């Protein structure tokens, strides 16, 4: 099957591929989904459609096939009336505990800029295309910190957490909270966030539990996005959905994390990709040389990724 597109129809092609994915996708939804607010960002829109409520996975699926999402979320909070547009009228019932790790907070990332002529520049130019380069080493370093957070939550708080790949360049760590954990307010959650970011044990010794022993072994505080942990009404990506910044799946990491195209992208086949830039790019240990306005054959997962990063467009796709 071949699908072709013009420049104006770019989003239609990506949207079609996303829709085909969601026709068979298995979304991981909470058992209390009727208490959660759902939201999505449509294609060609900078704003979210919020305050949605669904009573079953089938009802949600029907909706997203009619309104294909670039990004798809549900709330970390449970509400009496999740569809109420006034946040104060939703009736907050409690929230899960969240941690967010992003590569740009952990690694020293290389930002590449390209001018309209397609060439890379070290200076500023009008309407420059910016591309943040992610390495496997960086992603694996972020993953190790996600594992550390999970271990600390268990060892120091007695909480069981799950690790999810964000679908782009980071990880989410989630604790499904009930009882006292769910009722933690923003101040309580800030104390927990500070515990991870700036640990201050009174004594440091390798044999001591907690941060005292960790710091003695050379383990330092973790640079998390504290606002995510503090926020009691946060929207979180739905596992099984696609991240519209990269085209990769959001999924739980149950064992070892495999940073490979076949593991992250649900799409198979090849595409003709038309670059907007000139340069060499490394993705998943493969090097690709792009030349502005010269079509190149790429795996469709790479083509979608580079399209969503603004480096060009998928012109046609062959399964």
Image (tube, rainbow, N blue to C red):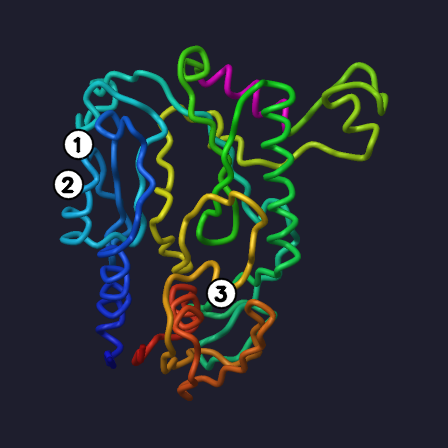
* Vertical arrangement, residue 244 with respect to residue 52, above or below: below
Q: Position of residue 77 (x, y in %)?
A: 34, 25
Q: Quadrant of the N terminus?
A: bottom left
**For this view, does 57 lie left or right of residue 258?**
left
* Vertical arrangement, residue 133 with respect to residue 92, above or below: below
Q: Position of residue 51 (x, y in %)?
A: 21, 33
Q: Is residue 187 magenta?
A: yes
Q: Residue at x 57, y 63 (%)?
A: 133
Residue 263 is marked as none
* Vertical arrangement, residue 77 with respect to residue 39, above or below: above
Q: Position of residue 265 (x, y in %)?
A: 42, 62
**Distance from label 1 to label 2 (Cα)?**
7 Å
Callout 3: helix, strand or loop? Answer: helix
Residue 55 is marked as 1
Residues under numbered marks 2 and 3 in contact, where contact means CB atoms less than 8 Å apart: no
Residue 261 is marked as 3
Residues under numbered marks 1 and 2 in contact, where contact means CB atoms less than 8 Å apart: yes
Q: Is residue 174 magenta?
A: no
**For this view, does 17 lie left or right of residue 232?**
left
Q: Going by the picture, which residue comes out furthest to the top?
A: 180
**For this view, does 86 lie left or right of residue 317?**
left
The span picked out in magenta is 186-196
Q: Residue at x 68, y 26 (%)?
A: 198
Q: Quadrant of the C terminus?
A: bottom left
**Distance from label 2 to label 3 (Cα)?**
31 Å
Q: Which residue is mark 2?
A: 59
Q: Residue at x 47, y 32 (%)?
A: 174
């Amino acid at each position: 099957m071949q699908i072709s597109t013009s420049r104006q129809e770019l989003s239609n092609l990506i949207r079609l591929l996303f829709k085909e994915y969601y026709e068979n996708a298995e979304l991981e939804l909470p058992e209390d989904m009727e208490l959660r607010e759902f939201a999505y960002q449509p294609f060609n829109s900078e704003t979210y459609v919020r305050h949605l409520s669904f009573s079953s996975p089938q009802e949600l699926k029907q909706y997203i096939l009619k309104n294909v999402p670039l990004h798809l979320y549900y709330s970390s909070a449970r509400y009496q009336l999740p569809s109420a547009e006034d946040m104060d009228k939703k009736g907050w019932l409690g929230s899960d505990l969240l941690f967010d790790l992003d590569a740009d907070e952990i690694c020293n990332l290389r930002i590449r800029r390209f001018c309209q002529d397609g060439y890379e520049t070290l200076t500023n130019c009008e309407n420059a295309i910016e591309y943040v380069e992610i390495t496997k080493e960086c992603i694996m370093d972020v993953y190790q910190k996600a594992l550390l957070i999970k271990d600390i939550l268990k060892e120091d708080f007695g909480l069981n957490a799950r690790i999810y790949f964000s679908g782009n360049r980071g990880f989410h760590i989630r604790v499904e909270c009930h009882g006292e954990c769910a009722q933690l307010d923003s101040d309580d959650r800030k104390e927990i966030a500070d515990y991870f970011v700036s640990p201050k044990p009174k004594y440091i010794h390798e044999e001591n539990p907690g941060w005292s022993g960790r710091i003695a072994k050379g383990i330092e505080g973790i640079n998390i996005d504290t606002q995510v942990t503090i926020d009691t009404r946060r929207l979180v990506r739905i596992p099984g959905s696609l991240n519209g910044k990269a085209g990769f799946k959001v999924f739980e990491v149950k064992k070892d994390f495999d940073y490979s195209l076949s593991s992250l992208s649900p799409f198979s086949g090849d595409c003709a990709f038309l670059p907007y830039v000139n340069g060499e790019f490394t993705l998943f240990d493969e090097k690709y040389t792009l030349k502005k306005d010269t079509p190149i054959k790429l795996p469709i997962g790479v083509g979608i990724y580079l399209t969503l990063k603004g480096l060009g467009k998928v012109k046609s796709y062959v399964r």
